[in-house]
Amino acid sequence: MSNAPILLTPGPLTTSIRTRQAMLVDWGSWDRDFNQLTASVCEQLLAIIDGSASHHCVPLQGSGTFAVEAAIGTLVPRDGKVLVLINGAYGQRLAKICKVLGRTFSTFETAEDQPTTAADVDRLLAADPAVTHVALIHCETSTGILNPLAEIAQVIKDHGKRLIIDAMSSFGALPIDAREIPFEALIAASGKCLEGVPGMGFVFAEKAALAAAEGNAHSLAMDLHDQHAYMAKTGQWRFTPPTHVVAALHEALQQYNEEGGLPARHQRYADNCKALLDGMAAIGLRSFLPAEIQAPIIVTFHAPKDARYQFKDFYERVKAKGFILYPGKLTQVETFRVGCIGVVGAAGMQAAVNAVAQVLREMEVLDI
Ligand SMILES: *Cc1c(COP(=O)(O)O)cnc(C)c1O
């Protein structure tokens, strides 16, 4: 499918032919070769955060949210309390997970263009000693805003509390070093900045915390302690693994390393983001976030104010020119989003901008 559109969406995203071809083999879930594939994937994932001394990598079947839910359900004891830091839809989802799991929680919400600060967290933890865990979204994908992870993590450590990071859309592209940033758990997934296909999440869990988490989980399938214990003993996944997804991720990791690992992936996405922002600015489209807090992962743009602009029509016309965009996720302002991640470079981003410009001319949208 050479004429398949380029996905400028932050997962699923455009993958390489090599990654897709890695799915043409069937694997036995009990087979030594597949177990080695799983072990190699986990080892490579841990290496990205320099976490092999401090953390276990526990993979889990399902989309990213499954892994987030599993991390909270496994690591937060039933009598724990979570402080959830929110500035967008994925932060809201964290709070909802706590609610559904029956964990006590409080929330702190800032505007969607306002990062949470370390000073906020310092004040909140001083005011509520009952909090045991803080849950933070690193890059809030609903806008593309970056929260100051290192500073917040330090404050949480100073208070003797534990940090759970949803780094789903930043892991692999933005540097996170487990030797420098204290955290109990960090969650990501196959189908984002590693450019694998969707279908599995993984949780880096502090070894001592995971060992102490037996019996916390409310759910059998979502119990990361059990998943890890079984995998450590047998080398196998506890229940049917997403074999093709694991194989694709293994292949995607190989390409990640060939490209130059995290610094190279970060640079390519930063170049993509710059090409996108510059190109859109040149045709009059404004981004929602100021540059200082914009992560090079996904960009939110204000929709044109012209009555002739309708997202659905715009989307279909841009798709016909080869690019899949993403709807906005803000409640107050009309926006649309464009991802900077996946197998695409700055020339591809410029081509997407050209397609957007052409479409707006076709739609006779003038007021942008
Ligand atoms: C993609 C993403 C998730 C997981 O979403 P799924 O649809 O379950 O894969 C969670 N948090 C953030 C910040 C994300 O970008």
Image (tube, rainbow, N blue to C red):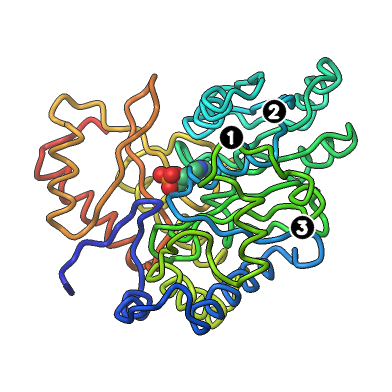
Q: In this view, does 309 lie above or below 232?
A: above
**CB atoms of marks 2 and 3 within 8 Å:** no
In percent of width and height, residue 220 lies at 54, 44
Q: Which of 304 and 38 is in front in this view?
A: 38
Work out whether residue 83 or residue 318 is closer to the camera in this orientation and state it: 83
Q: Name the residue under label 1.
A: 218
- Please identify, in this view, whether the residue under mark 1 or under mark 3 is nearer the observer: 1
Q: In which quarter of the image is residue 123?
A: top right
Q: Where is residue 252 drawn, in percent x and y?
A: 46, 74
Please tell me the numbered disc located at residue 178: 3
How far apart marks 1 and 3 lie (CA) works out to 28 Å
Asked whether the residues under the numbered discs 1 and 2 touch, taking CB atoms below 8 Å apart as contact, a structural biologist would say: yes
Give the secondary structure at mark 3: loop
- Look at the picture and state if 177 lies above or below 35: above
- Left or right of residue 360: residue 142: right
Q: Can residue 243 be seen in this view?
A: yes
Mark 1: which amino acid? His
Extreme residue toward the top, this view: 127
Q: Which of marks 2 and 3 is nearer the N terminus?
A: 2
| Spot occupied by residue 143 in the image (x, y as percentages of width and height) | 46, 37
Residue 337 percent location from the top left of the image: 36, 42
Return the residue at label 2: 78
Quadrant in the picture for residue 212: top right
Do residues under tags 1 and 3 come within 8 Å of each other at their CB atoms? no
Label 2 amino acid? Arg
Q: How crowded is mark 2: few (under 14 residues within 10 Å), some or many (20 or more)?
A: some
> Closer to the N terminus: mark 1 or mark 2?
2
User: What secondary structure is found at the residue carrying circle 1?
Assistant: loop
* Lower position in the chain sequence, tag 1 or tag 3: 3
In the image, residue 341 above or below residue 280 = below
Q: Which quarter shows the C terminus?
A: top left
